[in-house]
Amino acid sequence: MRLVLSPYEFDSASPAAAAAMLLGRDEGGVLTIQPTPFGNSGPDAAREAATLAPAYARLLEKWRWTGPLWRGGVLQAAGSGQSLATMLSRSAAALLADRSLIAARGLLKVGPSDDESAFLESLSRDLIRGGSDPAISLPLVAVTERLAAEADAALVCGQLGGMIWKPRPGAPTSFTFSIPLILGATGGEILDTRAALADSLETFRNVLREALMAARLGQVNGHAGAVRLAAEAFAREFRSIRSSRRPDAHRDSADRPVEAVFSVSIVPTGRAVREAVARLSRMIPAPRASAASSSVEATIVPRERSIALMRVRLAAWDFAPPIPAR
């Protein structure tokens, strides 16, 4: 099962990150966007770029805990380097083709960035701040959603991406389930947990994958119960292994188990883009779009597709205290 995780969620305290990195398959199970230097993406190039872009250096430090997951193949970059700069530029150009965004033209930038340091600085700063710059965050919404559509992967989102991925009130939910997760774990600890739960994870992934396929066809009824039963079985195995491996662990420890609730919806492609555009338009008054202006959905994301939006939140009955992010 492949999942897409927004780079805004790369925080060890994020339930969405914990969920994606636990449930994604072993090889390239979690796709995301990764800022890297334009040329050589090795460690030497990253260190050199970090000296020229302080925000990039801070982002590398913030993401350090994910290192083992990259090296282990669970995390995979679908966009990086200069290709990412080009993707964001094309995404911004497509957004600007919509006449409802005329007033936002001063905020959205068109044209690929040839300045590596400036690009890494602006993108890294926005990822650290959680999407405060529309010139970065709005095109990145479109790129991330397109990634999920083209990879036929579920898009995992949570509180840290709430500004962008907040669902519309009353949006239909295909099915829900809850499982325990570990917040605050390092990448190595997540890999260890995946290995200890390998059989249970594979069983649960298979049931969940079938339910997602059925939901896209509008035939989820029988699968919703199967997902809940599989989630309960996985939770029992998780707690059993956790208690045997960490019998002295407490809820206030650096890495702690929490209960997370998942809500899965099947939404048409372009949904996240349209809602982000609507929020930006409310912030910046814009003329009413003409009937012929519908380029956002057509040019940014593939037509006639849907994506599974998997929203993750801590259960209301989980009263564990918050933990500091790594």
Image (cartoon, rainbow, N blue to C red):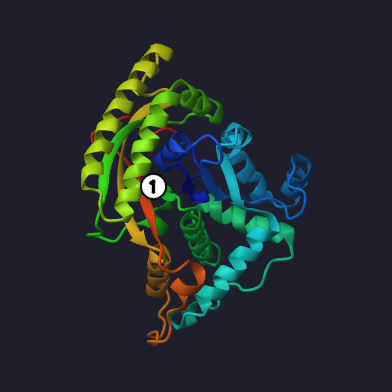
**Residue at the (23%, 34%) spot, across then down:** 317
The answer to whether 195 appears left or right of 35 in the picture is left
Which of the two residues, 70 or 220, is positioned nearer the viewer here? 220
State the image coordinates of residue 175 (x, y, percent, origin top left). 25, 46
Which of the two residues, 188 or 11, is positioned nearer the viewer here? 188
State the image coordinates of residue 195 (x, y, percent, origin top left). 49, 23
Mark yes or no: residue 181 visible: no
Vertical order, 55 against 95 (above or below): above
Mark yes or no: residue 143 visible: yes
> In the rendered view of the protein, which quadrant contains the N terminus?
top left
Vertical order, 63 against 202 (above or below): below
State the image coordinates of residue 43 (x, y, percent, origin top left). 74, 40
The answer to whether 60 appears left or right of 99 in the picture is right
- Disc 1 secondary structure class: loop
Residue 122: which quarter of the image?
A: bottom right
Q: Amino acid at mark 1?
A: Gly
The answer to whether 100 appears left or right of 44 in the picture is left
Which of the two residues, 223 or 236, is positioned nearer the viewer here? 223
**Residue at the (38%, 65%) spot, across then down:** 271
State the image coordinates of residue 26 (x, y, percent, origin top left). 53, 34
Residue underneath mark 1: 158
The answer to whether 175 appears left or right of 13 in the picture is left
Disc 1 crowd, CA 10 A, few/some/many (<14, 14-19, 20+): many
Which of the two residues, 116 or 40, is positioned nearer the viewer here? 40
**Residue at the (78%, 41%) spot, across then down:** 44
Q: How many marks?
A: 1
